[in-house]
Image (tube, rainbow, N blue to C red):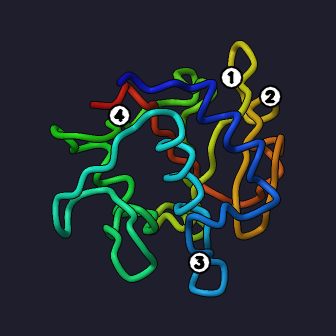
Amino acid sequence: MPYNREKAVAYAHRWAFGRNPLYADFTSMGGDCTNFISQCLHAGGAAMNYTPVTGWYYISMNNRAPAWTGVEEFFRFLTTNKGKGPFAVAATIKDIQPGDVVQLSFNGGRRYAHSLLVVEAGYPPTLRNILVATHTKDSDNRPLNTWEGVVYRYLHILGAR
């Protein structure tokens, strides 16, 4: 089933300020952002990859892949996945479309610690006209340029298997 960007974005809008009861809320355990983004990609048709340790799946709070909730693990899975599930490439801002992912580093790019789902992107995409949804500090339709002093990392979702 191909990745459906519209469904991923619709899910992001639906749950940006709420929590889907089918999933645990990780806000008090370091953040819910990547859990939320994983849910969005799954809602967009990306099948879970149940490969132990290196896969991308959620069964319960205590039975999930690190890539489902971890920022760096999520990036690694998406950019190296050759099996089932979503796959992506590290991209530049000009490649960004709704349904793609942006990750933020708050320490100059040494470590990325926040994931956002692109819900709208102008043409050409800029920090001002890319709007995102995220959890932890819940946001929807938030311009990317409202984060200060961050380094951005862009993930263009190529598809899902």
Q: Nearer the viewer, mark 3 or mark 2?
A: 3
Q: Residue at x 59, y 58 (%)?
A: 36
Q: Mark 1 or 3 closer to N-term?
A: 3
Q: Residue at x 69, y 44 (%)?
A: 12
Residue to which mark 4 is pinned: 89
Q: Are marks 2 and 1 in contact (CB under 8 Å)?
A: yes
Q: Mark 3 or 2 closer to N-term?
A: 3
Residue to which mark 2 is pinned: 129
Residue 41 is marked as none
How far apart, in angstroms, are the residues tagged by discs 4 and 2?
21 Å
Mark 3, other Cα within 10 Å: few <14 / some 14–19 / many ≥20: some
Quadrant location of the C terminus in the rendered image = top left
Residue to which mark 1 is pinned: 125
Q: Nearer the viewer, mark 3 or mark 4?
A: 3
Q: Identify whether 9 is placed above or below 112.
A: above
How far apart, in angstroms, are the residues tagged by discs 1 and 3?
31 Å
Q: Mark 1 or 4 closer to N-term?
A: 4
Q: Mark 4 or 2 closer to N-term?
A: 4
How far apart, in angstroms, are the residues tagged by discs 2 and 1?
6 Å
